Image (cartoon, rainbow, N blue to C red):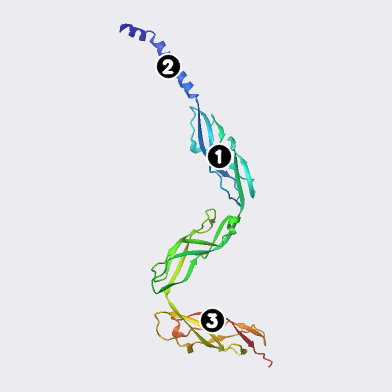
Amino acid sequence: MNLLKKIFLNNLPLKLFALVLAFLLWFQTSGQKEVQTTVAIPIEFTNMPRDLEITNEYPKSVNVLITKEGAVRLDENALSLVVDLRNAQPGIAVLPLTEDNIKNLPSGISTGDFEQRRLRLQFERTRRKLVQVNPGILGQPAEGFRTGEIQVYPGEVLISGPQSKIERITSAGTETIDISGKNQTFTQTVHLDLDDISIRIEETESVDVVVYIEEERDEIKFRVPVRPAAEEDRIALINYRTVEITISKPSSHEERIDPDLFRAYVSVGNDQPEGGVVEIVPDIPIPDEYMEIVRLEAVRPEKVRVTIRNSSL
């Protein structure tokens, strides 16, 4: 026991110095050991021209072999593969990828193999246009009711995207509006829906849709006489004595509609030349008795021919 103690304690300062020296030498050697790892570096575009779109699929990141000394710290999340697009033009471009493209690469770290050394991009001109909004309607109203007019505010929206895709789009849809069982008019705010995610909506992401729900209506057809308007004294001849009109009324309204209360009136106005023949859309006012009940649906023919009086005769 004394012998062992004598061996360990003999020249103790020298032995401690040697131990510390060995540790420092090991630490320095281990710190210089090279470590290789593969890092997925996201692609970042700069100086993209405002009037161009990338229209093809491309990788959002590239795997790169990284070599670093063991003591060097690397924040992989800070790395990005920057691609400068300031010289981009419509068509196809093939862009080289090198270590120079890597942003935030610390000193003491080098790169090896890239998963791919070239980036292929296809560019198109950006186009904008106004398209009509067509709301998506699902279901049927309550029994005895029907869907009337559907109004959208705003009725048109501005969209933008690659020219080839914008040219094919004629309208923008909306998320579905369910009218099942509805028995009265309502307004609903809905988001716009475009199938292609590369198409952007410029001004608004939602619209207000007014769905008019009304009672089912019965249609009635009958003929009414055509007459000059009360103030009209320029009409010499009307080629139709009567026109057929189609009116509608709520199905629950059981009282008879009197056809004798309806008239069609024509007026040529002062801007028409004397002695000429013109086609006029007749005016068919709804009688006061039926103003809240009857709706004019159609007139046949839509226009009547009128001969204008010649004042010299």
Disc number placed over residue 81 in the picture, else none: 1
Residue 243 pos. (x, y %) = 55, 85
**Cα distance, mark 3 to mark 1?**
69 Å
**Cα distance, mark 2 to mark 3?**
109 Å
Mark 2 or mark 1: name the one nearer the start of the chain.
2
Q: Mark 2, mark 1: which one is toward the viewer?
A: 1
Toward the right, the furthest residue is 312
- Residue drawn at x 47%, y 18% as measured from the top left: 25
**Cα distance, mark 2 to mark 1?**
44 Å
Q: Is residue 268 above or below residue 156?
A: below
Q: Mark 3, mark 1: which one is toward the viewer?
A: 3
Quadrant of image for the C terminus: bottom right
Q: Is residue 56 above or below residue 178?
A: above
Answer few, some or many: residues within 10 Å of disc 2's Cα (few below 14, many 20 plus, some between 14 and 19).
few
Residue 22 pos. (x, y %) = 44, 16
* Residue 88 seen in this snapshot: no
Disc number placed over residue 286 in the picture, else none: none
Toward the left, the furthest residue is 1
Residue 20 pos. (x, y %) = 42, 16
Answer few, some or many: residues within 10 Å of disc 3's Cα (few below 14, many 20 plus, some between 14 and 19).
some
Disc number placed over residue 299 in the picture, else none: 3
Q: Which residue is mark 2?
A: 20
- Residue drawn at x 65%, y 85% as measured from the top left: 277
Q: Amino acid at mark 3?
A: Val
Mark 3 or mark 1: name the one nearer the start of the chain.
1
Q: Amino acid at mark 1?
A: Leu
- Between 11 and 177, the one nearer to me in the picture: 177
Quadrant of image for the N terminus: top left
